[in-house]
Image (cartoon, grey):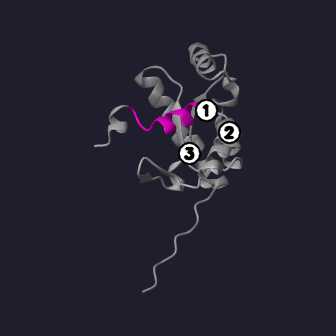
Amino acid sequence: MDRRLVRGGDPAHRQARHRLAGRPGDAGAGQARRRGDPQGGRRGGRTIDDDHYGAGIPFRFGSPDEPGLQSLFDAYRKRTGRDPKDYFAIGDATAIVDKIGEFVAAGVSKFILRPAAKGDDDIMAQTRRLIDEVLPLVAARWPKPKRRMAAE
């Protein structure tokens, strides 16, 4: 087992994650730098495929002034020195999809959306709304290319 994994991952990955946390333009610029990397995405003796990189976005159906969100915003601001409004996707389904669109416009194509929620019931309710309301909008806005049938 790679000792870096035991210690929490590759230090360069942790630094990049911290530097690029949250802003669509920064995430896209980071991907462009990796694509132009003379090592071709190799770090620590292993190759990292280009499609491995993406963005993690906390989301919430609701309003930014809901109780409980302020502590998340404060922690993000303290950790990064950045405005949480540039990072969090908060509002209705359209607002969440629009935030994803900012990252897509910056060149990001892989996402992890995490509910900004407390407790199992809230996490499940937010996740259910993401599935029911956001995924259909994403599918309509960025349809998957049709798969080609292998030549027989």
Tell me the amino acid under the disc marked 1: Arg
Q: Give the spatial CA distance, label 2 vs label 1.
A: 8 Å
Name which residue type carries label 3: Gly
Residue at the spot 39% in from the left edge and 32% down from the top edge: 8
Q: Main secondary structure of the magenta part?
A: helix
Closer to the camera in the image, 110 or 131: 110
Q: Which mark is residue 26?
A: 2
Residues tagged 2 and 1 counted as in contact (Cβ below 8 A): yes
The numbered dot on residue 54 is 3
| 75 to 34, vertically: above or below | above
Q: Residue tagged by mark 1?
A: 19
Three-letter amino acid code of the residue under disc 2: Asp
**Nearest-to-viewer mark from 3 and 1:** 1
Mark 1 crowd level (few <14, some 14–19, many ≥20, 10 Å Cα) = some
In the image, which residues are magenta? 8-18
Of marks 3 and 2, which one's residue comes earlier in the chain?
2
Q: Is residue 108 visible?
A: no
Res 27 quadrant in image: top right
Q: Is residue 66 visible?
A: yes
Quarter where residue 129 is shown: top right
Q: Are marks 3 and 2 in contact (CB under 8 Å)?
A: no
Q: Position of residue 19 (x, y in %)?
A: 61, 32
Indicate the quadrant containing the C terminus: top left, top right, bottom left or bottom right.
bottom left
Residue at image coords 54%, 47%: 53
